[in-house]
Amino acid sequence: MSLFNIFNIAGSGMSAQGQRLNTVASNIANADSATSSTGEVYKAKEVVFEAVPVAGQDSSGVRVQQVVESQAPPKKVYDPKNPQADKDGYVEMPNVNVVEEMVNMISASRSYETNVETMNAAKTMLLKTLSLGQ
Amino acid sequence: MVGKLDEALRFQQTALSLLAQRQQQLASNIANADTPNYKARDIDFNSALKNAMSRGKSTAAPSTLATTDAAHIGGNNPNTTAGGAPLLYRTTRQGNVDGNTVDMDVERNQFVDNSVRYEAGLTLIGAQIKNLLAAVQG
């Protein structure tokens, strides 16, 4: 039954967009983390989406294929009093672009909402089908 | 007698089945709106319905390859829906840098359009059933 598969497809979209929102939250929260548990400066993370077939069907859902770290160079901030400062007084700050992250966040939440609406439409259609002939 | 009942409802049933398959394909396009290199696909409802009706049977699943192991690739034809309707690629007006061809406005438009058609189909088949029941009960 094709309509039941819509739940799987829209659900995969919702979880993928949720994961994308998660990385955005992590990036924004760490926008000022000059160091981390590895001793290195935090690098912005991004998800890469991939289409996957759903339950032997030809139409596909979506999943997060991998999470990549941004290769942009870290921002250098002049702050000689900071214990992390190098000999010239510069501190390496994360390469997180907060504006980009906000745009990413809005895009992810809109996509999430669209998937929820898709699911709702499928649910309405299924319920109407159930009441057929009454 | 049963054959005649089946014949009476077959058109609407075929149409509903195709509309449900199309709805699934549109949901898939919407879910993959942000996937790099994903190409939006859709079925041509008009010709798919004509084909299904001229085949003289409902849109039952086409024959598939036998699999003897869970790891075998399913024998589904990647260019048709599960019901056998051919899947076509959408032509885009504005390409995307990442190779994705999903136009959200088009997809949502078609999605709502398709769901209204599905509900119309349900209403029609419901009315047909009522008519048949009225004829049976007198």
Image: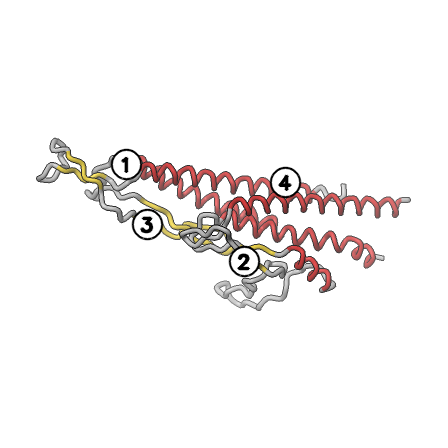
Separation of marks 1 and 4 at Cα, in angstroms: 42 Å
Left or right placement of residue B2 versus residue A92 in this view? right
Q: Nearer the viewer, residue B80 or B41?
A: B41
**Which type of secondary structure does the marked residue at label 2 adopt?**
strand
- Name the amino acid type tagged 3: Val
- Tag 1 secondary structure: loop
Q: Are marks 4 and 3 on the same chain?
A: yes
Residue bearing mark 2: B89
Instruction: Give residue B88's quadrant in the image.
Output: bottom right
What residue sits right under mark 1 in the picture?
Answer: A31
Please tell me which residue is depicted at 44% across the width and 48% down the height of the picture: B34
Three-letter amino acid code at the position of disc 4: Thr
Is the residue marked by circle 3 packed among few (<14), some (14-19), or many (20+) residues within 10 Å?
few
Name of the residue lying farthest toward the left: A87
* Contact (Cβ within 8 Å) of mark 3 with mark 2: no
Position of B9 with respect to A35 (left or right) is: right
Q: Which residue is mark 3?
A: A68
Nearest the eye: B66 or B106: B106
